[in-house]
Image (cartoon, rainbow, N blue to C red):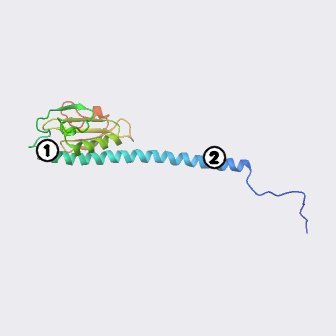
Amino acid sequence: MKKMNSNKSFKPGFTLIELLVVVAIVGILASITLGYLASARKKGDDTAVKSNLATARSVVELFYLNNANSYLPLGGSTFSIAACPTYSASGTNMFSNNKIVADTVAEAVKRGNGSSCYNSDNIWAIAVGLKLTPNTSWCVDVTGTARMVNFTPSEAIDPATFICK
């Protein structure tokens, strides 16, 4: 039988190298996870843009029926292609005059990457930039179109026809 050497002391624990390896592994896993979370957040924002613009499209059609078959409020004027306006009770276009339309478009704009709107008495279009794919927009218009276009919002609405490119 062997005797233990009583001069050597045994201290349980980890060495500095082992601790540094564990910290490095945890750091690598955290960075990978955060990368996926950023991508998931962008996908969520893009989905919110699409959903809000689908709601806006439905509300716009109700606005049309309630305003004597016009997409402009009584006494309103055409809103040329520009960044979507915010709500104003005295607004002269559908996007600013109707609170529900304004709120759904504003939520899409908040979750997206820029916007562009057009509104006349018989035509309308909305484009909001998507986050996941640069230089793309989700565009909806009077024809029932709801699709991704490979343009920034300021370029997504055709200046000749005033519908999505």
Q: Quadrant of the C terminus?
A: top left
Q: Are marks 2 and 1 in contact (CB under 8 Å)?
A: no
Among the 4 quarters of the image, the one containing residue 64: top left
- The residue nearer to you, when weighing 48 against 157, is 48
- The residue nearer to you, when weighing 27 against 88, is 88
Disc 2 element: helix
Residue bearing the label numbered 1: 64
Residue lying farthest bottom? 1
- Amino acid carrying label 2: it is Ala
Mark 1 is surrounded, within 10 Å at the Cα level, by few (under 14), some (14 to 19) or many (20 or more) other residues, namely some
Relative to 95, 131 lies left or right: right
Up-down relation of residue 43 to residue 8 (above or below): above
The x, y position of residue 123, in whole percent, is: 16, 38
Residue at image coords 68%, 47%? 20
* Mark 2 vs mark 1: in front: 1
Residue at image coords 20%, 47%? 59
The x, y position of residue 89, in whole percent, is: 20, 39
Residue at image coords 12%, 46%? 66
Residue lying farthest left? 68
Relative to 92, 131 lies left or right: right
Spatial CA distance of label 2 from label 1 is: 60 Å
The x, y position of residue 130, in whole percent, is: 35, 40
Disc 1 element: helix
Among the 4 quarters of the image, the one containing residue 124: top left
Residue bearing the label numbered 2: 24
- Amino acid carrying label 1: it is Tyr
The x, y position of residue 28, in whole percent, is: 58, 46
Mark 2 is surrounded, within 10 Å at the Cα level, by few (under 14), some (14 to 19) or many (20 or more) other residues, namely few
Image mark for residue 101: none
